[in-house]
Image (cartoon, rainbow, N blue to C red):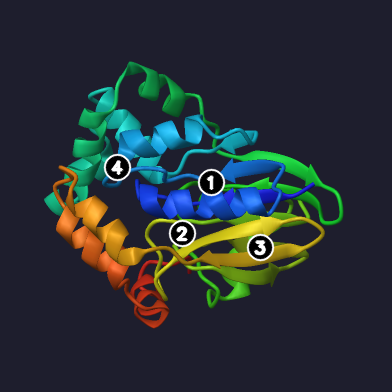
Amino acid sequence: MRVAAIYDIHGNLPALEAVLDEIRLAGVDQIVVGGDLLPGPMPRETIDCLREIKIPAHFIYGNGDRETLERMKSVETEWYRRSPEPWREPVRWNAEQLGANDEKLLASWPAMVRLQIPGIGGVLFCHATPRNDTEIFTRVTPEDCLLPIFTGVNADIVVCGHTHMQFDRTVGMTRVLNAGSVGMPFGEPGAYWLLLGTDAELRRTDYDLAKAAERIRGTCYPQADEFAARNVLNPPSETQMLQAFSRVELK
């Protein structure tokens, strides 16, 4: 059995379409959508694209999906109250673009999914950590900080996302993989994902960045120009983001 893990799409439909093309060519049997489908510049189109795929798919929610859902229900979360307006605006706009069927869909997603994959064993898929959907850790976070989270998860492999940077590391007895980000990568431009089969393979898919940026700028997304420039054409480097995350990662 081959399973594709696609995380942190963030409404970047062109990136998603490119990854799905590769997934079909790879003969994938199942897909796990690992959270933060939202917010982003093409929310309805991205949801519709995933509704239409013929490959069986499992969905889990990320903090972005959760915050968007709460705004759809007119709930003002603590995060929303405390966040600066440039962070709140995309969540609010995404919530306004979606309808009742989308709200029902988002509300149905669990926090985690477990699959048994022949050849590599039991795999736990979560968004950030098995503990919650917001904790931050990277490939350089000290193992001592992570052992309390990953000890006792009862899985051979844990797959996560949230920080938009791929890695493959071991915490105690558990292999921990970050699938990277399809739609908002930190590092070289492209769309990042994970292929699980007899082993785990970190993947990066090239796509037409200029055309994608043009499509995104053609939307009504309030931060379309910034998204196209910063998240598609010229993402921040891994070095920059490791330094930024060092201030907020698990200690």
> Which numbered dot is residue 42?
4
Q: Nearer the viewer, mark 3 or mark 1?
A: 1
Q: Are marks 3 and 1 in contact (CB under 8 Å)?
A: no
Real-space CA distance between mark 3 and mark 4, rounded to the nearest whole angstrom:
30 Å
Q: Which residue is mark 3?
A: 176
Three-letter amino acid code of the residue under disc 2: Ser
Q: Which residue is mark 1?
A: 34
Spot occupied by residue 188 in the image (x, y as percentages of width and height): 42, 76
User: Which badge, 4 or 1, comes first in the chain's sequence?
Assistant: 1
Q: Which residue is mark 2?
A: 181
Spot occupied by residue 105 in the image (x, y as percentages of width and height): 45, 24
Real-space CA distance between mark 4 and mark 1, rounded to the nearest whole angstrom:
18 Å
- Can the viewer see residue 41 in this picture? yes
Please tell me in which quadrant of the rendered image residue 74 appears: top left
Real-space CA distance between mark 2 and mark 3, rounded to the nearest whole angstrom:
16 Å
Three-letter amino acid code of the residue under disc 3: Val
